[in-house]
Image (cartoon, rainbow, N blue to C red):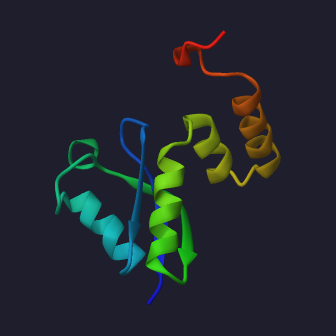
Amino acid sequence: MGAYVYILRCCDRLYYVGSTRGSLDLRVAEHNAGTYGGYTKSRRPVELVHSQYFDRITDAIAAERHLKGWSRAKKEALIKNDFDLLVQLAKNRTEFPHPSTGSG
């Protein structure tokens, strides 16, 4: 049984990244119903803007953790399937340390 990693756009324009083993449509409906509380409950309605299927749940969870660490710009490039921009953003991140790291 496979799994999905997904990105939701919340009503406040923030993004939520999650994963599910079951039906993706059902999981989005659960977010919109506030079934489980948490981050999206106060940010409804939500809209599915990206999903990717994995054969193994462990791969979907690993992808979820990875995406949660991404900047908003990188998530938006992925959502738009702008892989050239995504590569550029990844390069910029490694070449220019974030100001909060205290380096420099």
* Residue appearing at x 46%, y 74% in the figure: 58
Picture quarter containing residue 70? Answer: top right
How many marks are shown on the rendered structure?
0
The answer to whether 78 is drawn above or below residue 21 in the figure is above
* Residue appearing at x 38%, y 80% in the figure: 23
Q: Pinpoint residue 77: horizontal percent, then vertical percent.
A: 68, 45
Picture quarter containing residue 34? Answer: bottom left
Screen quadrant of the N terminus: bottom left
Picture quarter containing residue 101? Answer: top right
Extreme-right residue of the structure? 84
Screen quadrant of the C terminus: top right
In depth, the one of 3 and 61 nearer the eye is 61
The answer to whether 57 is drawn above or below residue 44 in the figure is below
In depth, the one of 71 and 11 nearer the eye is 71
In depth, the one of 87 and 103 nearer the eye is 103
Q: Report whether 94 appears left or right of 99.
A: right
Q: Pinpoint residue 15: horizontal percent, then vertical percent.
A: 44, 44
Q: Pinpoint residue 98: horizontal percent, then vertical percent.
A: 61, 21
* Residue appearing at x 51%, y 43% in the figure: 69
Extreme-front residue of the structure? 103
Q: Report whether 98 appears left or right of 38.
A: right
Q: Report whether 81 appears left or right of 9.
A: right
